[in-house]
Image: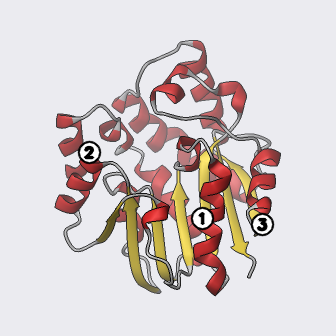
Amino acid sequence: MDTQAGDWNAGGDFEFAALSEARNYRQALVREFERHLQGRILEIGAGIGQMTSEIIGLPHLDEVVSVEPDPDFCQIFRRTHPHQGLIAGTVNSVPPGGKWNAILSVNVLEHIQEDHDELAAYHALLAPSGGTLCLFVPARPEIYAPIDRRFGHYRRYTRGGLAGKVREAGFEIQRIRYFNFAGYFGWWLMFRILKRPQFNPGAVRWFDRIIFPSMHWLETNVFPPPLGQSLLVIARAKV
């Protein structure tokens, strides 16, 4: 278990300790976005910095600024990433006028009731440079479970519904696809059917080490999955 997860597990109720086990998953997600993460990057909803740790070492980065509204998460983030730029707030707290080459938003949009306003704010920040939105959200409303509600998720997205919202916000979609085909069935069984109230660190570790790598290779190199636990979007802001 990493220091970030251990620190939060001692003082809060979010599942960072279990999610810290999903290392292959996070690294695969970064690889999906990597070539678009260049120049000045804005990371929305940084949490305690688990994704931050994966991206700050990428080449071709001039600056990464993280944004996080939760004060407890910010406290841990500052302790574990003392040299990393952090804005304590939401996307609306980002000072106007900066030139951003990309926004990384991972598992954020589902927490926001007026998600079209959030996407519009992303576009306003990226439009001056024609920057890229790297967006990742939970997918498929039919597997919305009590744990989604506990996490503060307003929704899970369909591919068509998300694509429409992204386009309405002023983006041109370059890529959209489902992510983690096997995870769809795991989420459906564990959280929708069995209604498990939380993640099991051992189960997360087993899935991440044994199931996910081969399944992700297949869905990346052999066939795009017809559905998945999440949706991944890469979109360019229209000027």
From the viewer's perspective, tell me whether residue 219 is left or right of residue 51: right
Q: Alpha-carbon distance for marks 1 and 3?
A: 17 Å
Place of residue 180 in the rendered image (x, y in percent of width and height, measured from the top left):
63, 44
On the picture, is 205 further left or further right than 152?
left
Which residue is disc 3 drawn over?
173
Q: Say which element carries label 3.
A: strand
Labelled pair 2, 3 in contact (Cβ < 8 Å): no
235 to 45, vertically: above or below:
below
Disc 2 element: helix
Is residue 139 toward the left or the right of residue 107 in the image?
Answer: right
Task: Pick the residue in front: 110 or 159.
Answer: 110
Kindly identify the residue that appears in the image at 79 percent across and 62 percent down. Answer: 167
Residue type, numbered disc 3: Ile
- Residue under label 2, please give it: 5
The span from disc 1 to disc 2 (Cα, nearest Å) is 30 Å
Are there few (<14), some (14-19), or many (20+) residues within 10 Å of tag 1?
Answer: some
Residue that label 1 marks:
121
Q: Which mark is residue 98?
A: none
